[in-house]
Amino acid sequence: MGCRDFTEHSVELLGPGGNAVFTPPVTPNRLQRSLRVTFLGMAVNVVLACGKLIAGVAGHSHALVADGVESLADIVSSLIVWRGLVVAAKPADADHPYGHGKAEPIAAAVIATVLLIVAVGIALRSIEESLLGHPGPRPFTLVVLLAVAVIKEVLFRFVRKEGQAVRSTAVETDAWHHRSDAITSLAAAVGITASLIGGPAFATADDLAAIVAAGIIAWNGWRLLRPALEELMDATPDPQLTEQIRRIAKQVPGVIAIEKCFARRMGYHLFVDMHVHVDPLMTVRDSHTLAHAVKDSIRSELPHVFDVLIHIEPAHGPRDSTEAVRTNRVQGTAGERVAS
């Protein structure tokens, strides 16, 4: 199989004999929007991480230091998202005929794993500090944490909105990373408040807040890891979407029934496989034309459907001997991928 440039952002794959297999489009605006929010989050995290670490050390707040470490993890996550988006946007080639869309869930899975690792590290550090004891936090650390919580919540809402708009698993996961940072900042603020009000007797409240924050981070990490793994394992998308694809296909004249219909995600796009029942007397040419019509109809109504693999089958039912012979001939074309 070879390939040739088709447009600036796509390639046309060529099968044996030079026939086109399919043309995978890549939307440049989607990549630009995804990278814009990723770099914005990265810049904010660099500023916040430095501020929280300096304030945490100067103000004797382990919860604030832990929050600063979590922001450093956010920076690493943003770098991973950046690379995942760039790789996923690459057009299909001879070695990757289905494109590089899996790079996005891989990036999301790595980010979620980083969250879990950070959570364990924060919890262990906080437990150690609570046993050893340390001076209580200073009042200014509370102001820093509240400001950070507001900034991160605003950033979460913006990044999540963009992630949903471009249908990016990696960007949405990165958004929830910002939300986890806002939650940990609030938890740390509660601990510092208790420590400031209660005095030396409540000095460990700062560490307990960091442990609670670690638990929240771990929960978010696991919650984000599951959908990324499901996408990597080609889990079925929303059943309602599958039913919608079935309904669109059934409306095409000449389609008698849809026996099977499977869909799987590849980054932003969907790949669909279906078995279409047609009249057993239909010729190979007509069945090929019908398959084109079904594919075009689905992709017209659902633009994020990347490709449709259609398997033509004869409709079931009693047939006379003449029809049976013709059916056997039609069944010789078990299935074909139709090109757009």
Image (tube, rainbow, N blue to C red):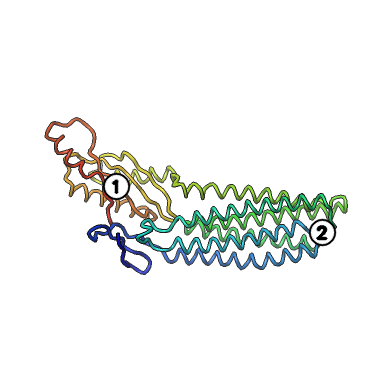
Q: CA distance from mark 1 to mark 2?
A: 65 Å
Q: Residue at x 65, y 67 (%)?
A: 46
Decide if residue 228 is on the left or right side of residue 221.
left
> Which residue is labeled 2 in the image?
137
> Which residue is labeled 1 in the image?
310
Q: Earlier in the sequence, mark 1 or mark 2?
A: 2
Decide if residue 201 is on the left or right side of residue 229.
right
Farthest residue in the left direction?
Answer: 322
Q: Residue at x 18, y 42 (%)?
A: 330
Picture quadrant of residue 260: top left
Mark 1 crowd level (few <14, some 14–19, many ≥20, 10 Å Cα): many
Disc 2 element: loop
User: Can the viewer see residue 340 in this picture?
Assistant: no
The quadrant of the rendering that contains the C terminus is bottom left
Give whichever of 97, 319 is nearer the camera: 97
Q: Residue at x 77, y 60 (%)?
A: 142
The amino acid on which the numbered mark 1 sits, given as a three-letter code, is: Ile
The quadrant of the rendering that contains the N terminus is bottom left
Residue 331 at x, y = what percent? 21, 41
The amino acid on which the numbered mark 2 sits, given as a three-letter code, is: Pro
Disc 1 element: strand
